[in-house]
Amino acid sequence: MRLRRKPHTGEKLQNFSDFVTVCKFGEEINVDAKNLFGENSGRKLYAEFGTGKGDFILKSAEKNPEINFLGIDIESEVILKAARKIVEKNLGNVRLVVLDINRITEFFGENEIDRLYINFCDPWPKKRHAKRRLTHVRFLEMYRKILKPGGEIHFKTDNRGLFDFSLEQFAEAGLKVRDVTNDLHANEPPENIRTEYENRFSSEGVPINRCVIEFD
């Protein structure tokens, strides 16, 4: 569900223009994603699609200061909230982008991302909307272009139907899948970083599905 538009969000985001990029609908994208990090552009690049209010990517950036993190969301309102958190924590290895995921091959160059996080994306439960799911083969082919050889997708969802569908899509695309679990928190690895949604679902007793997808 999209958030209700709030007035002046675009103007407020301009205050964070040193680390927030807005790719407007209908306008050409003239941004080199990796160069957003300036002199640190040579580091590994991890991206999160659907970064929301930014808790996951900020915690990841704090834990891994040697890696660049890029949070992407179509909703400028949540990017604004994430931007304020970045300022509070004084993180220099995070950048945020307002972008429609359908345009990622315009934004990223080939073989540019080392790791991609897809956390609790919209399950689009109706069959006629299957192509909108971020794990559909249509998107997987896009990811194949922008991920480096040996790159990974780390995928988490509370929706078992979406997870099972996704495993079928990964197989159809000829991708290797590992670390598959239907209850991540039953034996939660210490390196797991929880998202806002993950904490909420876990508190409600909903099991979390998770896997890692490897690209050749």
Image (cartoon, helix red, strand yellow):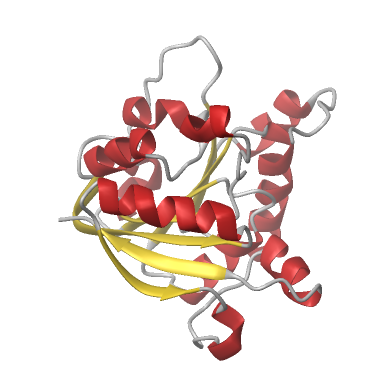
Name the side, left or right, on which 21 lies relative to 144.
right
State whether residue 214 is above or below residue 187: above
Q: Residue furthest front?
A: 127
Question: How many tags in the picture?
Answer: 0
Q: Nearer the viewer, residue 122 or 15?
A: 122
Name the side, left or right, on which 199 lies relative to 121.
right
On the image, the x and y values in percent for residue 101 come to: 48, 33
On the image, the x and y values in percent for residue 47 come to: 43, 51
Q: Nearer the viewer, residue 44 or 203?
A: 203
Name the side, left or right, on which 104 lies relative to 158.
left
Q: Nearer the viewer, residue 85 or 171?
A: 171
State whether residue 2 is above or below residue 67: above
- Residue 113, can we see it? no
Who's the residue at 56% across and 74% down the image?
Answer: 193
- Residue 154, can we see it? yes
Quarter occupied by the C terminus: bottom left
On the image, the x and y values in percent for residue 77 come to: 74, 36
Quarter occupied by the N terminus: top right
On the image, the x and y values in percent for residue 10 come to: 71, 25
Q: Nearer the viewer, residue 68 or 133?
A: 133
Who's the residue at 36% across and 69% down the image?
Answer: 66
Who's the residue at 51% across and 34% down the image?
Answer: 130
